[in-house]
């Protein structure tokens, strides 16, 4: 089982200090919601975000959406070999059933996550697909009991996707951590939780591209491409 | 240079026959636009789309958005080794400057493409980044003068991403065609334009996952990962 943790993600509800900002009120009104129910989103709350600390790392639910669509629709996940976790900037943790089919449409995804924040789990009937709770990264990693935690960062040791992934197939329950934020770097706390910090390219990539490449390479190293044809019966 | 063509994409403006449908009028009103200016989007026009022919292959601008974000933010594109084209269901062609930085936010992307349909090119000032014109796939391929056109389809010959991509680095200006639609298969016309039709997995993948894997594998086969570290200077 490969664990992917989208860590310190730029996902949270609009904080109380800017509930009364005109851009927040206007957005809430147009959606028929309360400011407190909305996800913080730089596309709509740009001017309101100026007053927030560490604003450059916040308010980008689209990054989480893209990462999840690139992770969950892969053979590795479909065959039960992947667990994806979203840890947020403010220490919330979203756990995701591998069988969830997330909305492709961004607005519907945001609506779903807003509902998740309100109810704690979705859907309200039937099998739970998404859950959210207060949890630190440290708490999550303790629970995962990984043999190794590798964090991807442009500040890490020079490597490539292939070199990062190659040793993992022999290890029990490895974890890869990718930053779910648009700019800046991991906090020192996150780095200290990592066994290794590795860079896969001299320039940074968008998080969803990192997720996509790591999963594909893991599938390759595990022999997925040919195994799948054998199992499904070659035509 | 690698060409990627997102072909028969589910991207178009709302067709005239459903301009007066309540779901279209409501959406147009909420955006302060005319029905004729809107992109067709199943998320908002689901009931109106029932009357459209081949509706299952239409109205999914999010697929194009995801494909482009997975293609344009790669080292291959940043280093000028990639050209991406969006061909639509109704034979429109969008040409894309490799230096464009597309909106990450879906609603902003849709707004940009709506503007593109109205003006023919964006932005209106400065260097043109996106252009749209009437063009068949045949016309595009004649213009590209590729040594080989490979179409990815679950109905194609059994292969893997690695096997599809490996021979390409020795070829002049190869073209990979990926379907930009949610369901169904390429038209016979598109298949006839292909030198080879290949399947990379027994199940179909979402288009953006195919795009992402093809580009990464092409970079690997071209020695990008180590070359980039050498060029940027290893730390």
Image (cartoon, coloured by chain):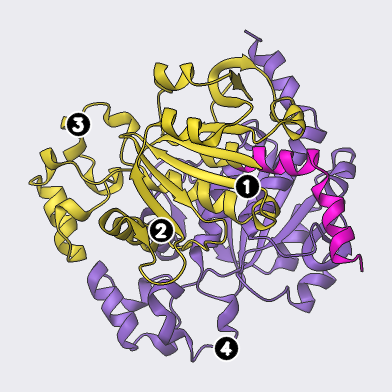
Chain colours: A purple, B yellow
Q: How far across and how far down the image is residue A185, in percent?
A: 72, 74
Residue B224 falls inside the magenta stretch = yes
Q: Secondary structure at mark 2?
A: helix
Dividing the picture into quadrants, the one containing residue A38 is: bottom left
Q: Which residue is mark 1?
A: B82
Dividing the picture into quadrants, the one containing residue B130 is: bottom left
Q: Are marks 2 and 4 in contact (CB under 8 Å)?
A: no
Indicate left or right for B36 with B54 as reference.
left
- At x 40%, y 24%, the residue is B184
Q: Are marks 4 and 1 in contact (CB under 8 Å)?
A: no
Q: Which residue is mark 3?
A: B52
Q: Are marks 3 and 4 in contact (CB under 8 Å)?
A: no
Residue A188 falls inside the magenta stretch = no
Q: Are marks 1 and 2 in contact (CB under 8 Å)?
A: no
- At x 63%, y 60%, the residue is A206
Chain at numbered mark 3: B
Asked whether the residues under marks 4 and 1 belong to the same chain, the reply is no
Q: Are marks 3 and 1 in contact (CB under 8 Å)?
A: no
Is residue B142 shown above or below B118? above
Query: Distance between the Cα atoms at labels 4 and 1?
Result: 38 Å
Indicate left or right for A214 with B29 as reference.
right
Q: Which residue is mark 4?
A: A53
Q: Nearer the viewer, residue B45 or A147?
A: B45
Magenta segment, prevailing SS (helix, strand or loop): helix
Query: Distance between the Cα atoms at labels 3 and 2?
Result: 24 Å
């Amino acid at each position: 089982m490969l664990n992917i943790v989208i860590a310190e993600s730029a996902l949270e509800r609009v904080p109380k200090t800017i509930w009364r900002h005109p851009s927040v009120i206007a957005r809430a009104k147009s959606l028929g919601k309360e400011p407190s129910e909305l996800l913080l989103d730089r596309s709509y709350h740009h001017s309101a975000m100026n007053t927030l600390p560490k604003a450059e790392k916040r308010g980008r639910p689209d990054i989480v959406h893209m990462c999840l669509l690139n992770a969950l629709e892969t053979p590795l996940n479909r065959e039960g070999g992947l667990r994806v976790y979203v840890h947020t900037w403010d220490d919330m943790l979203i756990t995701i059933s591998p069988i969830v089919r997330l909305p492709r449409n961004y607005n519907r995804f945001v609506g779903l996550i807003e509902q998740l924040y309100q109810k704690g789990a979705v859907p309200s009937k039937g099998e739970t697909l998404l859950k959210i709770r207060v949890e630190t990264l440290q708490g999550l990693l303790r629970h995962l009991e990984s043999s190794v935690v590798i964090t991807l960062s442009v500040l890490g040791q020079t490597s490539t996707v292939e070199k990062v992934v190659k040793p993992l197939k022999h290890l029990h329950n490895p974890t890869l951590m990718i930053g779910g934020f648009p700019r800046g770097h991991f906090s020192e706390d996150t780095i200290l939780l990592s066994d290794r910090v590795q860079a896969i390219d001299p320039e940074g990539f968008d998080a969803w591209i990192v997720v996509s490449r790591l999963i594909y390479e893991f599938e390759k190293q595990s022999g997925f491409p040919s195994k799948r044809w054998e199992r499904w019966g070659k035509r």
